[in-house]
Image (tube, rainbow, N blue to C red):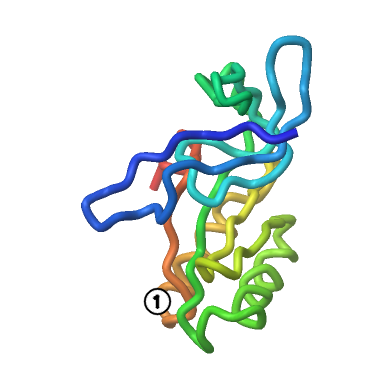
Amino acid sequence: MKVRFKLERDEDGWPPADSEGLWAEPLSDTFRIANTPWFVRNLASDDVVIAHAGSDGVLWATGKARWSGHLTIRVLPLRDGQGLAARQAVLDAFRPLGVEGEGVAQFGLVALDIPPDADLAAVKELLHCGTADGRWEYEEGCISDAWAEP
């Protein structure tokens, strides 16, 4: 099933949607997120959220019950356009570090799912190197205190 999240746009109109639907596994009275968010901030794969059906019958998230330890980083490929090959190149670069993700063609970006046991220093180094050499730009969607440390 899907749980929808309301999104707030910034002054530049980002993200380009009013809401995002994420696959979720129903638990007793909560839902475990089953994919990596492209736009929802402070949310990652395997997080547990609270959601209630709205008058429209749609399950709307109302809060986060538990953080899974996963991180979400969004990467926008710059080199070779933003097509399938560029998105796949991002995924291929991070796969040896145990980082998975998925791309979205409509917006040309990749959402990376960084598991709790990942080598954060290596992931950050690759992100910084890719930014420095013009392969991509990135933003932090859901990070930990350990990630935020210099």
Taking depth in this image into account, of 56 and 132 the one nearest to the observer is: 56
Please rate how many residues cluster around mark 1, counting C-alpha atoms within 10 Å: few if below 14, some from 14 to 19, many from 20: few
Q: Position of residue 75 (x, y in %)?
A: 51, 64
Image: 42 above or below 121: above
Q: Residue 40, can we see it?
A: yes
Quarter of the rendering containing residue 31: top right
- Quadrant, the N terminus: top right
Q: For mark 1, give the secondary structure.
A: helix
Residue found at x 41% / y 56% = 16
Q: Position of residue 24 (x, y in %)?
A: 72, 33
| Residue ranking furthest to the top | 29
Residue found at x 71% / y 27% = 32
Image: 87 above or below 98: below
Residue found at x 39% / y 52% = 15
Taking depth in this image into account, of 39 and 90 the one nearest to the observer is: 39
Q: Position of residue 14 (x, y in %)?
A: 35, 54
| Number of numbered callouts drawn | 1
Taking depth in this image into account, of 2 and 39 the one nearest to the observer is: 2
Residue found at x 53% / y 79% = 82
Quarter of the rendering containing residue 7: top left
Q: Which residue is mark 1?
A: 132
Image: 143 above or below 89: above
| Residue type highlighted by circle 1 | Ala
| Residue ranking furthest to the front | 56
Q: Residue 50, can we see it?
A: no
